[in-house]
Amino acid sequence: MRPQRWLPLVLALALVAGGCGGGDDDDDASPDGTDGTAAPGDDDAAEVDPSLCPVDALADADKPVEIEYWHAMTRANEEELIRLTDEFNASQSDVRVTLSASPSYSENLTRYTAGLSTEELPDLYQGEETNLQLLIDSQSIVPAAACIAADDYDTSGIIDRVLTRYTVEGIQYAMPFNVSNPILYYNKAAFTAAGLDPEAPPTTLEEVREASQTIVDAGVATHGISFKTDAWFTEQWMAKAGEEYVNNGNGRDARTTAVAFDNETGLELYTWLSDMQQDGLLVSTGTGDIEHYVAIPNNESAMTIDSSAALGTIFQLFDQGQYPNVDLGAAPMPGPASADGGVLVGGASNYIVNRSSDAEQAAAWKFAEFLADEQTQSEWAAATGYIPIRESSTTISPLVERWAEQPELKVAYDQLLAGADNLATAGPVLGPAGARGEGMRGAVIDAIAAMFAEGLPPEDALAQATEGSNEAIEDYNDRVG
Amino acid sequence: MSGRRWYRTAGRYALLTVLALMFVFPLYMMVVNSLLPPEQLLKKANFWVSPGDALWGGYSTAWNEGHIGEYLGNSVVVTTLIVAGQVVTAVLAAYAFAFLDFPLKRTLFVVFLTTMMIPFEVVFFVNLDTITDFGDLPLVGDYIGFDTYGGLALPFLATGFGAFLVRQAFLSLPRDLRDAAALDGYGHFRFLTRVAIPLARPSIAALGLFAFFGAWNQYLWPLVASTEDHRTVQVGLGFVSEGSVDQVNVAFAALVLASIPLFVLLIVFQKQLVRGLTAGAVKG
Amino acid sequence: MREALLGYALVLPALLVFGTFIFYPFLRTAWLGLYEQPLFGGDSTWVGLEQYLDEWGSEDFRNSLFVTVKFALFTVPVGISLGVLLAVAGHQRLRGIGIYRTIFSSTVATSIAVASVLFFTLFNQQLGVLTKLLHREGETPVLDDPRLAFIAVCGVTIWQNLGLSFIVISAGLQAVPDDLLEAARVDGAGAFRRFFRVTMPLLSPTLLFAVVVGSILAFQAFAQVDLLTEGGPGDRTNVLTYAIKTTALGNPPDQGAAAAYAMALFAITLLLTVVQLRFLERRVTYER
């Protein structure tokens, strides 16, 4: 492992050789599971200095301690977050949370990175899963593991895979909050009309192709599947195949220095996309936010892939009788199947900002804890369509009733639990994870767009995506030192 | 009317109408689409909405949940500050350049003109730091910092162009006027307010108009220097359209609402507007 | 002495604004380009001209420069030609021409943001009327198509500028004396000839103004790129201003690199003003 100049706090860590010692009282506080599964970080599981998180500072502070939470939830999700925050504020008198909304994750991050120089920062920050490395490198966050240790907080109730997602080199950096993953949305009415079994949606890419062909041949829709140009899906497919997306154990053993998706599986995926489009089975809807699912009532497609977080909105829009031709179904994301694979944990998590006063950091931890709490998660998942981060939240009200009423909401949860817990399914961690127009995701989006719009051959597209990503990684690593 | 002439006239109207369609069609679709329920926007191209089916809900959604009302209010405040600032600083500086003598006058005038060669897009990110620093100043910090009306207006309170325009107008006033005013015992202030400004009114009005359009239509600066609280309508539109992806009618309604103020101005003040906008183009 | 003091006092407010928000940030930007900024705040390192040269030599920069120049070369001539066409059409003496003139001015009442959001929605692959009219159902959306996105951005820009072009060129046209055209007609000059031999030369000061202002505005275009394409697809619409913004305020920000882009934009603006004035001055007929 190379020296981590960027992480002086690592100096304070004691590397625990050989996993967790039997007599260690802090077993439960260790971020990875204790059941001996091959969770990443087991080999170099690290303990973080609990003093990094001043959980006791709240006791001596003038109350209430006011903190600001920067989030990127919109509409129904934002409303629920406001409700939960009001509930939290009303439930105790130590901490007062003020919400500050950004219109998207990416703008929330821009606001945050700009704030690093202007010192306009929140006390708690909601960051998309791709922010992880960037936030570590910024040295502006308190590792959640420090708070967990300092507060003797029990993480054992949280789904291992969710914790793994936010753990790098053995340290859990963020407190999980809202989790989603991509699922298949499909029009059961179109399946029936095409003679397909509406209760047996495709599970592999070959089956998607076959179903698409049947749908197009039957004239039910002009294409089988509508596809949004989004780098996230290729990341998911690689994880489902059980393969790492970037090198150095998806960036979790050591800093990412190059992508790893330029392999046979990567080429298969790009080729599949390209062939599907060229054969008229897939309609590319570009980078727009809605076109891929609007294509379904428009009879331009009968399937699409999107985040489970969109489920509430999509069902509300298309399954309320406005479109007699649509009877929406939800199913696990079709793709490569592997025993070592599984969909990635998507969504966002909460970061405690270390530039705030001790009391504010402690207060931020209290609120992050509340948002990850069993009852909160049950309410949150019931109202939004995100999946709960605790198994126990699924057995209590209101989520039990909500899932009974709309079983589609459970698809993403089952899909997540079905996946293996390893480095591949932990997902890539890198500074320039990027978004449209920047970093690795930007390069992948551009390559796929060129494949769809200009007929760039899949091997060239893959090479272009690789080259663009590696350049971004190199630039970033140069600058981070 | 001879047949040939009739054809020619018809041809002229046909050309005019085709050209007019270029303008009218997008604007017409904007209005029609703002009144359609989202599901009618699918598939069939809807070029018409019967008054009975018109759905006005998009407007209230855009106004309330979309905050277009607040954004328009912010735009009015920021634009007013900028127009007032530009007119005042230009008149003052122009007066000095036109009627007063002082060392370095020519140099200073060249400095004023130089400002026109530095695009705002070159300097905006340093200005963002400046405004953010201003936010920490005692007393005034809350009014001129990041995400304040003052912060949005400050960088535009003076332009070299404005001083130039008004100076030209002042210079074209007859020299005797100043002398006559001096004989009447007019001081600088009275001469400026009683004689110079009234006589230079067309140029000052033109400057006000330029300032108004510039300020109202600004995008980059309000995008980077404000958040929800002080967002102007131009920037707000993007957020409304992003936030109403599944209700396209709301985005269209927001566009209509955002355009109404300028359309009213255009219709009411067309003549003055044309005269003002061409002030810089045609010397006459 | 008192007059001098008064003079300074009167120019002071404007000078303060210029100093704080134009000259200081300009020098500061130039200065920032000499330093390499660490990723997340902290002390910068002096690198001299190295960063400028690196950035200006980079493929990204050349692409942005190319896109920007192309954008100006496309939008300015097309926009002005259409403006001339509209002005000539609107100059006819016909019943109801006032209505047409109002319509031709109408985009003045929009803004580039309004136009961008409007066309963004009209171009929507599933809901947009333009997708249907252009028969692009089932094809890559216009704004995501590397071959079309640039043209679309130009088109929206031209459309939004039409009203202003019309107003400005119309005003120039009104200054063309009717008796001169009448004399040419008596001499047997056809409509085409009258236009190019009489109208155009007399219109040239106006057109010069339109070209200069249009080009400078074209190099400063930002909102349409931000709202329509975000610089994509594949950087095909990533004009300099947009690159400056995304670099200076990126994730994470890089003010040093942004400064190099910004200084290039400044140099171009300067050059453009000088060159255009010099070059066009000779061809412009000023006599009235």
Image (cartoon, helix red, strand yellow):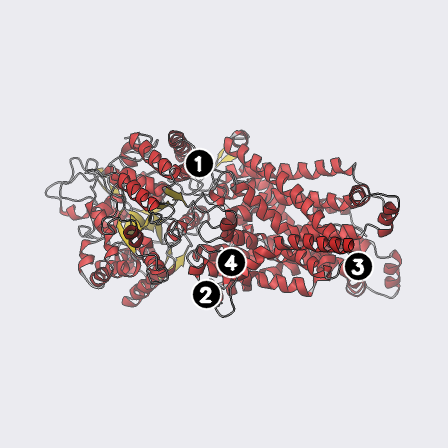
Q: Residues within 10 Å of mark 4 (few under 14, many from 20)?
A: many
N-terminal of the pair, mark 4 or mark 3, is: 3
Pointer 1 residue: A450
Pointer 3 residue: B1
Q: Nearer the viewer, mark 3 or mark 1?
A: 3
Q: Secondary structure at mark 2?
A: helix
Q: Residue at x 62, y 52 (%)?
A: B22
Q: Pick whichever, B57 or A92, lies toward us.
A: B57
Disc marking residue B61: 2
Q: Given the image, on which type of amino acid does mark 4 rest?
A: Arg
Residue A86 falls in image quadrant: bottom left
Pointer 4 residue: B231
Q: Residue at x 61, y 50 (%)?
A: C159
Q: Pick whichever, B263 or B48, lies toward us.
A: B48
Q: Residues within 10 Å of mark 2 (few under 14, many from 20)?
A: many
- Which residue sits furthest bottom? B52
Q: Secondary structure at mark 3?
A: loop
Q: Secondary structure at mark 1?
A: helix
Residues at marks 1 and 4, CA–CA distance in whole angstroms:
35 Å
Callout 2 touching callout 1 (CB < 8 Å): no
Callout 3 touching callout 2 (CB < 8 Å): no
Query: In this image, B91 relative to A198: left or right?
Result: right
Callout 1 touching callout 4 (CB < 8 Å): no
Where residue A431 appears, as percent x and y from the top left, is 37, 39
The chain holding disc 3 is B
Q: Given the image, on which type of amino acid does mark 3 rest?
A: Met
